[in-house]
Amino acid sequence: MADASPLASVEIPSLQGEVGPEEWKIRVDLAAAYRLVAHYGWDDLIFTHLSARIPGPEHHFLLNPYNLMFEEVTASSLVKVDLHGVPVSPSPFITNPAGFTIHSAIHMAREDAHAVIHLHTAHGQAVSAHSEGLLPLTQTAMLIRDEVAYHDYEGVAVDLDERQRIVTDLGTKTAMLLRNHGTLAIGETVGEAFLKIYFLERACHAQILALSAGDGNLNNPPQGAPEVTAEQGRIGLKMAAGALAWPALLRKAYRLDPSFAT
């Protein structure tokens, strides 16, 4: 059998042992999230972003290399940048300026935003373009809907002045529909952010399928049910992420391809 082409993979120097154990764990979790996003078909070539903040007063955070597909991202390839978008340690990779604008805005403003996930899926974009946004049509939507904020489209997010408007629109919520653009979720851990974006994406997908049958065929939930379900979501999603769903998802990531943890 012929040797694989050198273009089939990217050489990534390992950082294991070069960074502290706390940072390494965050790197592994974030790399796993990138691989899982690719596995679920939520990636957009190289053009969306997931980030995680490194604990400390500097507010350094990790972003993906701009030239890697999500199934190539590893713990060592993630680029650590400061709040000006400048790498704080040597890296052979560059980052996406739009990713820096959106993620730095939230990491700067929200102490609870240790992880931020932003996607451009077809269903997320479709709902972000719908005048009424996310509708309470399914249990999944009702679990996350009260946590969803909205931000109007201003063009590709490379203008640093937009950061304050993103933060203002997000307020105290933990998810967002960026109008005509995509979805976003934040969490105190990578696992919490991942579970929130999973519910938001799942709700958007179901909404597009339901609306395809026509508005006249929709069954709306009874009065009061969305509010009850929203409260259940506020309590349940955080607990499920840390203790149940994220450990299971990590095991899945290792089964799919353990190279993310290198």
Image (cartoon, rainbow, N blue to C red):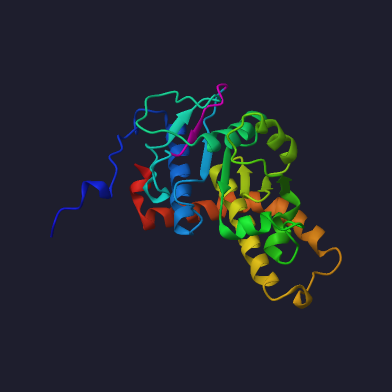
Image quadrant in which the C terminus is located: top left
Quadrant hosting residue 139: bottom right
Residue 24 shows in this picture: yes
Q: Which residues are magenta?
A: 57-64
* Relative vertical location of residue 87 with respect to residue 185 in this rendering, above or below: above
Image quadrant in which the N terminus is located: bottom left
Q: Residue furthest right?
A: 223
Residue at 34 percent of width and 32 percent of height: 15
Where residue 29 sits: x, y (%)? 47, 43
Residue at 46 percent of width and 34 percent of height: 95
Q: Residue furthest left?
A: 1
Residue 110 shows in this picture: no
* Relative vertical location of residue 8 with respect to residue 156 in this rendering, above or below: below
Q: Decide if residue 110 is on the left or right side of residue 86.
A: right
Tell me how many marks there are: 0
Quadrant hosting residue 251: bottom left
Q: Is residue 135 magenta?
A: no
Where residue 206 sits: x, y (%)? 64, 67
Quadrant hosting residue 153: top right
Residue at 68 percent of width and 49 percent of height: 179
Where residue 207 sits: x, y (%)? 68, 65
Q: Decide if residue 144 is on the left or right side of residue 197.
A: right
Q: Decide if residue 36 is on the left or right side of residue 92.
A: right
Residue at 57 percent of width and 46 percent of height: 118
Where residue 64 sits: x, y (%)? 45, 39
Q: Is residue 62 magenta?
A: yes
Q: Nearer the viewer, residue 241 or 160?
A: 160
Q: Main secondary structure of the magenta part?
A: loop
